[in-house]
Image (cartoon, grey):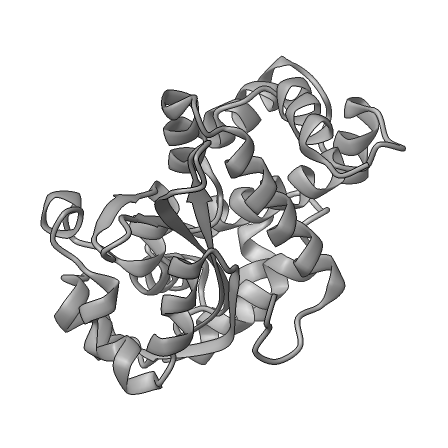
């Protein structure tokens, strides 16, 4: 598999794990759709001709998509002028040949996204992301669709205050959520920072914190050397009924079911 640029091995492992995870769910479309819907990272599913078939909640919030009805079945990635202008269209189409494609440091001007993707008009300059696209095949080896998973590297770089707040959350994700400390790191009042963060990211600071923390927990649950309770403890989360329900509401699976499914799909 070809890679554009250098991706950290930890992120590689997470993306490769997601790829195998989704492929393991082929044949159980209801579960696949539910897992994708609540996956904490933005995901889009495309038909072989490039038309959007599904967009999950994280993508709707982070990318600012106005309406699922105006996007799914209408947006076509192969006709997107933003993709063409960046010069990665030929590489992207290699996914139709059964290849997994890595687009690193993908920088898209938000005004282009706003015009073509029918996104919410926000005061944003650009979105920087790593994107992994991989095909899903049926038992006969025919392409059913392809999946695009987005890892946002720099969220909406139009506002330095938002970057500072996001960096603080990502550096202190093991600690209890503290909006006062986060707003102080961004040099803004709590109320102003909360409004600005929601405007520019589509989620509240607390939801961003929860999404990030759940993403880290998913990584820990893939470590066979840790029990489920130990994986939670490594993320400074008490393993109880409430935290298990939060995990299931965001991923579609209980922690133990996610652990079992991942262990069944991991290479020997």
Residue 239 coordinates in the image, percent (x, y): 72, 22
Regarding residue 176, the answer to whether it shows in the image is: yes
Residue sitting at 43 percent across and 60 percent down? 97
Residue sitting at 18 percent across and 70 percent down? 79
Residue 140 coordinates in the image, percent (x, y): 43, 35
Residue sitting at 60 percent across and 73 percent down? 3
Query: Of all residues shown, which one is farthest toward the top?
Result: 241
Relative depth, front residue between 167 and 20:
20
* Number of numbered callouts drawn: 0
Relative side of 8 to 241, left or right? right
Relative depth, front residue between 24 and 107:
24
Q: Is residue 162 above or below residue 264?
A: below
* Image quadrant assignment for residue 242: top right
Relative side of 15 to 144, left or right? right
Relative side of 67 to 123, left or right? left
Relative depth, front residue between 169 and 97:
97
Regarding residue 187, the answer to whether it shows in the image is: no
Query: Of all residues shown, which one is farthest toward the right?
Result: 225
Q: Is residue 186 above or below residue 96?
A: below
Q: Is residue 140 above or below residue 183?
A: above
- The C terminus is located in which quarter? top right
- The N terminus is located in which quarter? bottom right
Residue 87 coordinates in the image, percent (x, y): 35, 85
């Amino acid at each position: 598999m070809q890679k554009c640029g250098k991706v950290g091995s930890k992120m590689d492992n997470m993306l490769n794990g997601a790829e195998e995870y989704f492929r393991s769910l082929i044949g159980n479309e209801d579960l696949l759709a539910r897992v994708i819907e609540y996956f904490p990272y933005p995901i889009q599913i495309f038909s072989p001709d490039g038309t959007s078939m599904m967009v999950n909640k994280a993508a709707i919030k982070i990318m600012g998509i106005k309406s699922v009805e105006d996007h799914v079945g209408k947006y076509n990635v192969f006709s997107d002028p933003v993709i063409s202008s960046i010069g990665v269209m030929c590489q992207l189409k290699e996914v139709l040949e059964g290849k997994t494609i890595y687009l690193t440091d993908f920088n898209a001007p938000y005004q282009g996204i706003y015009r073509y993707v029918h996104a919410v008009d926000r005061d944003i300059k650009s979105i920087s992301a790593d994107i992994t696209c991989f095909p899903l095949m049926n038992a006969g080896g025919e392409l059913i669709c392809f999946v695009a998973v987005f890892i946002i590297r720099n969220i909406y770089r139009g506002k330095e205050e938002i970057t500072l707040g996001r960096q603080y959350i990502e550096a202190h994700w093991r600690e209890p959520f503290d909006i006062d400390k986060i707003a102080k790191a961004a040099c803004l009042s709590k109320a102003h920072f909360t409004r600005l963060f929601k405007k520019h990211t589509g989620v509240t600071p607390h939801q961003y914190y929860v999404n990030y923390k759940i993403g880290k927990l998913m990584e820990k649950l893939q470590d066979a050397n840790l029990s489920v309770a130990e994986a939670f403890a490594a993320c400074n989360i008490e393993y109880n009924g409430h935290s298990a329900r939060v995990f299931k509401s965001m991923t579609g699976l209980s922690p133990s079911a996610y652990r079992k499914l991942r262990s069944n799909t991991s290479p020997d």
